[in-house]
Amino acid sequence: MLKKARAAFIRHRLDELYPNPPIPLVHQDAFTLLIAVLLSAQCTDDRVNQVTPTLFALADNAQAMSQVSQQQVYDIIRPCGLAPQKSKAIVNLSKILVDQYDGEVPEDIAALETLPGVGHKTASVVMSQAFGHPAFPVDTHIHRLAQRWGLSNGNSVVQTEKDLKRLFPSESWNALHLQIIYYGREHCPARSCNGLSCDICKTCFPNRKRPIKTRKA
């Protein structure tokens, strides 16, 4: 099966499995999504969803968050890991939003990427899921599956994003990145499928005999 044929099959199969994929991080608006995605770095979505209700009860907008102390934020988000850096980033980015953007999250990926603690992936999630702009955020699941499915060589997440954007139409990106994440978690996890067992891997590579070693993001 050629790469374009694999991409078409994968998109069709994921549309069947996840026709309306929900955003896994609980949030109410662009600000709470931004904070939740920031917290999800090196942390599970489930853990983030456990701490954000308490955090957002303390402050659920940039104005309120800019007034709380870093220690208050740290005490709440400590279970997420990297809490010192994340708590500092949350308070500081909130102050920037108040000072430079009237307390609103900017609808601009370049502006988002200048905020403390906000990298390209986080900015892409906010642009796609909060504002509806086509984006293809690449997390560890997507980076791994793109290699198992022969859609990218895995040299870097930057290259994986470019490869996937070339293969799939832009109108599919916002749903597709969520669909791949769900599929990776449920059917093609890091330590079991190895490119040999799940439906998509077996269909795309029926003659594959050896486990696929993927490059880390």
Image (cartoon, rainbow, N blue to C red):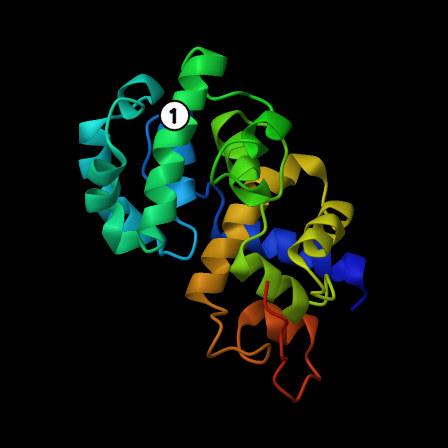
Spot occupied by residue 116 in the image (x, y as percentages of width and height): 48, 36
| 165 or 63: nearer the viewer | 63
Q: Is residue 3 left or right of residue 45?
A: right
Q: Dot 1 surroundings within 10 Å: few (below 14), some, or many (20 or more)?
A: many
Image point (53%, 60%), residue name: 140
Specify the farthest residue to the top.
102
Specify the farthest residue to the bottom.
209
Q: Is residue 193 left or right of residue 150?
A: left
| 152 or 94: nearer the viewer | 94
**Figure check: 61 above or below 192:** above
Q: Quadrant of the N terminus?
A: bottom right
Image point (58%, 80%), residue name: 196
Q: Is residue 83 left or right of residue 182?
A: left
| 89 or 4: nearer the viewer | 89
Q: Is residue 127 left or right of residue 208?
A: left
Image point (58%, 45%), residue name: 137
Secondary structure under the numbered disc 1 in the rendered image: helix
Q: In terms of image quadrants, where is residue 35?
A: top left
Q: Which residue is the site of mark 1?
A: 94
Residue type at tag 1: Ser
Image point (56%, 44%), residue name: 121
Q: In terms of image quadrants, where is residue 110?
A: top right
Spot occupied by residue 151 in the image (x, y as percentages of width and height): 72, 61
Q: Quadrant of the C terminus?
A: bottom right
Spot occupied by residue 94 in the image (x, y as percentages of width and height): 38, 25
Spot occupied by residue 106 in the image (x, y as percentages of width and height): 52, 20
